[in-house]
């Protein structure tokens, strides 16, 4: 297990790109409410990744889905997310204006929905963790994958805590550039994931 899962997750989750959404959802929040939102969103992101790393394969087995099929489907999902990011849209940002208004009205749930799910850890992030969980052969490798979830949670907390300074420093243009760069990395990684799945499904492709 190398750092490729962490790089992939950072590219998908990309908390920096979610900073504008965080600012939008927390408008009018008190300092205590904003801190509570940051803590809840960070812990929720870690929890989603940890659960997928530990139980993801068992869930696939329960539904009778082969990992190879999941890799191809997950790779396509990653590629779709990458294409969105190349257009300067957050990978998991699929919320409507109505959902944004509802979330702003229900402040107690903003940290989990939509900030954590689907903006931070949506289907693409979940499928990525499950795919890499299959490659983890030892307890320590699984522990490392869960540890990467902790890193994602910490990165989320740091970005959200410094949301306003980051937004002022980078500006929308800077955030767009960062999102496009992460999208390019994610596109390359998604091709690798799909290729691994296709080789398992169609061994003849190896030649």
Image (tube, rainbow, N blue to C red):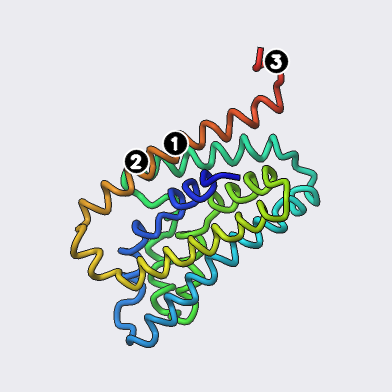
Determine contact: label 3, label 1, CB under 8 Å.
Answer: no
Element under disc 1: helix
Determine contact: label 2, label 1, CB under 8 Å.
Answer: yes
Element under disc 3: helix
State the residue at coordinates (65%, 58%). Answer: 143
Mark pair 3, 1: CA separation: 25 Å
Disc 2 designates what residue? 86
Front residue (pair 85, 144): 144
Characterize the local packing of mark 1: few (<14), some (14-19) or many (20 or more) Cα atoms within 10 angstroms: many
Front residue (pair 154, 32): 154
Residue 124 in percent (x, y) is at 54, 49
State the image quarter where residue 70 is shown: top right
Disc 3 designates what residue? 204
Disc 1 designates what residue? 187
In primary-sequence order, the first of circles 3 and 2 is 2
Q: Which mark is residue 179?
A: none
Determine the residue located farthest toward the front in the rendered image.
140
């Amino acid at each position: 297990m190398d750092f490729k899962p962490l790089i992939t997750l950072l590219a998908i989750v990309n908390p920096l790109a979610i900073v504008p959404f965080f600012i939008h959802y927390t408008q009018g929040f008190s300092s205590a409410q904003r801190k509570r939102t940051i803590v809840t969103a960070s812990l929720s992101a870690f929890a989603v990744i940890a659960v997928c790393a530990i139980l993801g394969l068992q869930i696939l087995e329960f539904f009778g889905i082969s990992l190879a099929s999941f890799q191809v489907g997950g790779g396509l999902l990653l590629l779709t997310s990458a294409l969105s990011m190349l257009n300067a849209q957050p990978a998991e940002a699929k919320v409507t204006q109505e959902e944004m208004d509802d979330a702003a009205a229900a402040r107690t749930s903003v940290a989990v929905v939509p900030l954590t799910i689907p903006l931070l850890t949506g289907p693409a992030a979940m499928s990525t963790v499950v795919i890499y969980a299959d490659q983890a052969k030892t307890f320590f490798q699984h522990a490392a994958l869960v540890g990467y979830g902790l890193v994602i949670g910490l990165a989320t907390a740091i970005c959200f805590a410094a949301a306003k300074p980051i937004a002022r420093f980078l500006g929308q243009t800077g955030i767009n550039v960062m999102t496009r760069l992460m999208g390019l990395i994610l596109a390359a990684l998604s091709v690798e994931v799909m290729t691994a799945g296709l080789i398992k499904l169609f061994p003849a492709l190896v030649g």
